[in-house]
Amino acid sequence: MENKTILAIFISVFLSTLVYQTFANKQFHALSQLYNAKLSKVSIVNTSYFETPNGLHKAKVVLPQNGQKANDKISKLPGQPYVEFNQYGGYVTVDESAGRAFYYYFVEAEKSKESLPLLLWLNGGPGCSSLAYGAMQELGPFRINSDGKTLYKNQFSWNRAANILFVESPAGVGFSYSNKSSDYETGGDKATAADNYVFLLNWLERFPEYKDREFYIAGESYAGHYVPQLAQTIVYYNLKLNKTLINLKGILIGNPTLNDETDLKGMIDYFGSHAIISDETVFAIRKYCNFSPNADTQSDKCIEAAEDIGYNIQVIDVYNIYAPLCFDGNLTKNPKKTSWRNFDPCSDFYTHAYMNRQDVQEALHANVTKLGHDWEACGGALRGWIDSSSTVLPLLKEFAKYKLRVWIFSGDIDARVPITSTKYSVSAMKLPVKTKWHPWFHQGEVAGYAQVYKGDLTLATVREAGHQVPSYQPKRALALVNHFLSGKPLVESSRR
């Protein structure tokens, strides 16, 4: 049995007791699919179609894109305020024979689009939409009002720093689809990395002005797998063909799943240190549970302690332990007053309503095949996840050889993939410290803490941010990404 970890058991127990607070309930629904799948024996998707005796077989991978960019231009989204930058949306085929295509949404930089880098954002789950979260609730140019019909501008959108590309992957997520129904049963890390790579090759054919542009990949949560695995694929083919097909310069991952064993240990420690579970439960977990990825069974006392955790976390939002819950997700006749300082916990409902409007889908050039199901923020048609690496830490260490910038950031009030987990994971890499732990500042306030390791890896926290950092601390998140893209360290203020 493959990696029957205690993490799988805990997730299963947590999910059986959780009260679903929103449509998507963030990424819990998708995580249940992942960790149930990790208990099964299923072979990994074959991605050998990349390989030929002559290297990359472009005849199968890269398709003609003539005229597609012009067709994808979005004139205006329903209820959208005026903006001066261009937006695009549409489908890119990643497997012609299977009829598999990914939906993307692209926003050019507000200024200097010709010189600023290209940044791809991926949400995790697995099975959660980058359109739902990244674009419409986190770092995109707009957010959705409580009427589910109109948008307001995100004044801290990351397209102030870069040209931003969002993609819904794998097939079955959001508007992305496949004509081969079995694709919805066989999602996995390796297949997703392969399809994301093919997506990028084709997208760059459609937008050739970005082929030589500096390129960065960012994401959060289970994108802690997607981002480094896609980066590894890019590096592999650049080296294999001795040619820079994609000009990758670095990766940025937030509150990421990195390493099963330390992710779980850090979650339990965070629950205990923040008085979410009792000292007795923490003690029982540490004494009776086996954190090894090779553990096949757990004791009754371990399972009992896991049930205690499920009982205690069901009444809070583990993605932001201090955030209010959504008790009324109904749309309002008139938009509520909005503030960047207070993220609306019912935003999932507004997003669901907006994305399922026919006029919105037509404006986005989405749902052109008329899917047999509603657009969902998480889950959608994806029903299976057949491979998931227990760790991506070796990949992060490997990137230092290729001089890739690697930044890991963590909202410090997230309990789902908390800072304790991330610190344990980074510590497990045993990297020499270059710049010791220190506060970093933005506009005179402590924005978080950071530590830099030899090999160009930075670990940074964002103070008072939950799992989706740009949702809860948009100003600090924009400051962070500006530092990352410029390569400037998060320096300590001269004030002591």
Image (tube, rainbow, N blue to C red):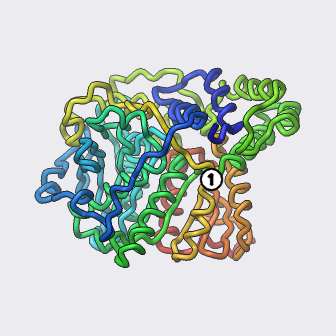
Q: Secondary structure at mark 1?
A: loop
For the residue pair 422 and 296, the one nearer the viewer reads as 296
Of 251 and 44, nearer the camera is: 44
Report the residue at 65% width, 51% height from top.
Answer: 259
320 up-or-down from 376: above or below: below
Q: Residue furthest front?
A: 53
Q: Which residue is mark 1?
A: 391
Q: Say whether residue 111 is left or right of residue 405.
A: left
Residue 467 image point, x, y percent:
58, 44
Residue at screen point 52% across, 43% down: 387
| Amino acid type at image mark 1 | Thr
Up/down of 118 relative to 332, above or below: below
Judged from this view, the residue extending furthest toward the left is 67
Please determine whether, in this image, residue 491 is positioned above or below residue 70. below
Above/below status of 252 relative to 319: below
Give the quarter of the image for residue 424.
bottom right
Tell whether 254 sits left or right of 310: left
The answer to whether one can see residue 145 in this image is no
> Which quadrant is the C terminus positioned in?
bottom right
> In the figure, residue 453 lies in which quadrant?
bottom right
Q: Position of residue 355 (x, y in %)?
A: 31, 33
> Percent from the top left, x then y, of residue 33?
52, 32
Residue 130 showing in the rendered view: yes
Q: Looking at the image, which is closer to me, 145 or 300?
A: 300
Whole-percent x, y for residue 91 in the image: 24, 47
Question: Is 329 positioned to the left or the right of 412 in the image?
Answer: left
Which of the image's four quarters has the N terminus? top right
Please report the residue visible at 23 percent of the width from the left and 57 percent of the height from the top. 86
Relative placement, left or right, of 443 versus 89 is right
Decide: few, some or many residues near mark 1? Use Cα within 10 Å; few <14, some 14-19, many ≥20.
some
Q: How many marks?
A: 1
The residue located at (29%, 54%) in the rendering is: 106
